[in-house]
Image (cartoon, rainbow, N blue to C red):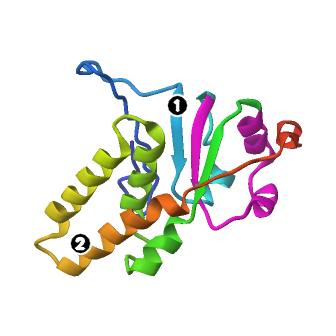
Amino acid sequence: SYDSKKSGGVTISHLRFGKAPIQSTYLIDSADYIACHKDNYVEIYDLLEGIKDGGTFVLNSPWTLDEMEEKLPASMRRTIAQKNLKFYNIDAVEIASKVGLGGRINMIMQTAFFKLANVIPVDEAIDYLKDQIKQMFGKKSERLVEMNVTAVDHTLEHLEQIDYPESWSQAG
């Protein structure tokens, strides 16, 4: 689902994977993986509603763990700790900016997804992403291809698992 009124609106993707074709359409209400691509959404939305115990949460932010103590709402910190989430942070905006993509973080966040979601082996996923980059941007500019491939190549080294304190389970 997405806000079609303007660029930069909220997009929520419900992805399901399985060995057999998925025939029916429905939204997910119990997620294994949730990613937040804009750090200010932590203040606006209940991002972790429906995440499974032991699920994975990925945040795109420039924040350190100490800054997260201040910036993440207490309810979010409680959910992360009480549900024993695997919590990752990546500053995708910084990566995109350094390689010349401005704020375009889509390929970075897709790379993080394929690393953490385990739907296909990450090396295969990265090869597939790079092929898609060449198909999507090859006719526009070789430089655009190079920037996106470089962004993908720098993603995994900047994806950081957050070792949050147990005290988050009592955040208030």
Q: With 70 as the anchor, is 158 left or right in this view?
A: left
> Marks 2 and 1, how far apart in space?
31 Å
x, y (%) of residue 125? 31, 47
Residues in magenta? 54-81
Look at label 1 and name its amino acid: Asp
x, y (%) of residue 135? 14, 61
In the image shown, does 94 or 12 lie closer to the viewer? 94
Quarter containing the N terminus: top left
Quick one: label 2, few (<14), some, or many (20+) residues within 10 Å? many
Q: With 102 as the anchor, is 75 left or right in this view?
A: right
Looking at the image, is 75 positioned above or below residue 154?
above
Looking at the image, is 158 positioned above or below residue 75?
below
Instruction: Give the residue drawn at x 71%, y 30%.
Output: 83
Instruction: Give the residue drawn at x 64%, y 45%.
Output: 87
Would you name the residue on which mark 2 appears? 145
x, y (%) of residue 121? 35, 40
Q: With 35 as the anchor, is 23 left or right in this view?
A: left
- Disc nearer the start of the sequence (2/1): 1
Q: Secondary structure at mark 2?
A: helix
Quarter containing the C terminus: top right
Would you name the residue on which mark 1 appears? 32
Instruction: Give the residue drawn at x 34%, y 37%.
Output: 120
The picture quadrant where one finds residue 122 is: top left
Look at label 2 and name its amino acid: Val
x, y (%) of residue 139? 10, 72
Task: Please indicate, yes or no, whether residue 45 appears anywhere in the rendered image.
Answer: no
Instruction: Give the residue drawn at x 56%, y 65%.
Output: 91
